[in-house]
Image (cartoon, rainbow, N blue to C red):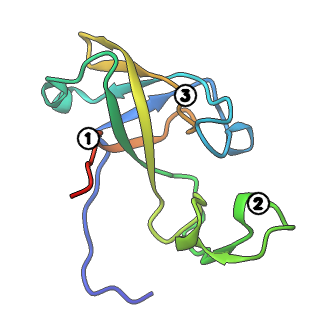
Amino acid sequence: MTTEQTFDIYPIGHVRSILKDRSSAPKQASENAPNATIEIHADFVEALDGIQSGQQIWIFTWLHQAKRSVLKVHPRSDLRNAIKGVFATRSPDRPNPIGLHLAKVLSVYPNGSFQVEALEVIDGTPIIDIKPAVECTPA
């Protein structure tokens, strides 16, 4: 592998979910993904200030069980689909397995955790960042 620069990414929290393994996780949140709890590590709880129930957020995860050497896949793991490069898919298997999830905040708790609606990742998945979802209006 050729790298010109490396980056340090560390978890700011973890997902708590009833999904325990990759095979039980839906491919997309809209495919009956369960609600989940996001637990933020104590060092980062202050960064949650302003997160509110009803808000849409982007959750960035590190898909820790991904196969990082995979460059091509059959989309949705369906052999009937033509093989594509992972950058043209939402496969969790990819060189840098960063997951991007749009979620609605359901509840915010004072202990540094909050519940989100329909998150398709498994229990224990590291959270690497959270950002508010903002609407973009065309110029």
Q: Amino acid at mark 3?
A: Ala
Looking at this view, name the residue that lies furthest to the front.
139
Q: Classify mark 1: residues with Cα within 10 Å, few (<14), some (14-19) or many (20+).
A: few
**Image-quadrant location for residue 41:** top left
Judge left or right: residue 59 versus residue 89. left
* Callout 1 secondary element: loop
Q: Quadrant of the C terminus?
A: bottom left
Q: Which residue is mark 2?
A: 77
Q: Nearer the viewer, residue 106 or 69?
A: 106
Quadrant of residue 94 in the image? bottom right
The residue under label 3 is: 118
Residue bearing mark 1: 134
Q: Where residue 44 sits in the image (x, y, percent)? A: 18, 32
Do labels 3 and 1 touch, CB within 8 Å?
no
| 106 shown above or below 9 | above
Looking at marks 2 and 1 on the same chain, the residue that comes earlier in the sequence is marked by 2
